[in-house]
Amino acid sequence: MKRALVRLRRRLLDLHSAKLLVAGYAAYMMIGWLLLCLPFSQSAPVSALDNLFTAVSAVSTTGLVTIDPGSHYSWFGQLVVVALIQAGGLGYMTLISFVILTAVNPRSRLSLKVSRSAFALPHGYEVRDFLRRIVIYALAVEALGALILYFLLLGRGVEAPAWSAIFHTVSAFCTAGFSLNPNSFESFVGDTPISLTLAGLSYAGGIGFLVVDDGWRVLTRKSPRLGFTSRVILRLTGILAVAGTLLLLLVTVWPADMPPWERLLAAFFQAMTAQTTVGFNTLPIGTLALPAIMVIYLLMIFGASPAGTGGGLKITTLAVLIGIVRSVSRERQTVTFMRRTIPEQVRTTAIAACALYVLILGSALFLLSLTETIGFEQLLFESLSALGTVGLSMGATGSLSELGKIIVIFLMFVGRVGFVTLGIAAAGRDESGAGDSDEVFVV
């Protein structure tokens, strides 16, 4: 038995970390599916496929649902959903690795390997210290957020405010978008404290743990300034947030009796929810005009940060593409962004991720057009939302056929594990003696 375990451990160490990530996320999804299928997890009958859809959506932190979690799952079922969201948001190996590397086996090569790959950590990052900091940070932010949200919901007469606060805090921080409310947060469209609390939690999780860790190193004077990746993330996040808010404010058809501040707040919230991939909404997405939908399209494609809780293409990939376009237009050989040269390996990875994104999105849309009778605009929105693990919906998810649900499940899975990661895993290549990345920029 001991020899078999040793051989298994060696085999796992020889496997490419991409394969381990794909297998790990798939295992979590299957465990969650089985738990949600238990009779006492449900307060109303839910089919096996809908349970699988929910489990994949939770682990991928997407938030698309085919049923209302608040009315179809018991408290235990909702607890399972929260646990899956937490595992998916922090990276499926984070909590396990944290325990192994701090208490059980500080020299666990397997945990070090998978954790470094899961967070795309560049050379120079100490995995054990990094995991310790992000776990403490995540639990502290979630505890504070739940406390604030509890008093806000209590004052508004929400049923079971404590559990609602915990559920929505974890969902917001992990940018999952799952809600116990049948209409998400549309009832709180003009509620400034709740909107800003949810936005703060979403940005705290979606901004990326590399930025948080960099900030901590600066505060503790272990580093003189934020790293290049962190500065790119913060700059582009701010630009997208402001631009998205202003565009939505201008192109959305607002009710005549809606005050200007509520319009600005609602526009900001919709931009934030698409950008961070949290998936909550205070406006009914299906009623928005096409120009507003197109703004949300763009924010859903690029918005999440590397080593964060969001999925899909990363905001740093957008930075690389901007650098490439500038380089080509100016007929330069080198690609730069913010006066820094982007290494060739990073450029290649970004282009490969975009190519795989377009290929997978196009294939899924073709298949969905064969299986569904829904309009193309809705199919595109649901597909972008699933692939970017955003969770916003124009109302089409619940009416998908069984084949349509399976296609969207695949999109959510790909969005969580990453396009390049899935491509490497599918290539069937093992990883022997792979070292850490020397790149200073992460996509």
Image (cartoon, helix red, strand yellow):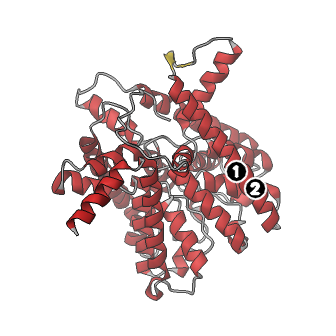
| Badge 1 amino acid | Leu
Residue at image mark 2: 365
Q: Residues within 10 Å of mark 2 (few under 14, many from 20)?
A: some
Q: How far across and down, in percent of the image, does residue 101 sit?
A: 22, 51
Q: Which mark is residue 361?
A: 1
Residue 303 lies left or right of residue 143; in this view the side is right
Secondary structure of the residue carrying numbered label 1:
helix
Residue 58 appears in view: yes
Residue 144 appears in view: no
Residue 161 lies left or right of residue 218; in this view the side is right
Q: Residue at x 39, y 60 (%)?
A: 87
The foreground one among 186 and 291 is: 291
The foreground one among 220 and 95 is: 95
Q: Residue at x 45, y 72 (%)?
A: 32
Q: Residues within 10 Å of mark 1 (few under 14, many from 20)?
A: some
Q: How far across and down, in percent of the image, does residue 355 sit?
A: 66, 39
Q: How far across and down, in percent of the image, does residue 423 sit?
A: 56, 47
Q: Dots 1 and 2: beta carbons under 8 Å?
A: yes
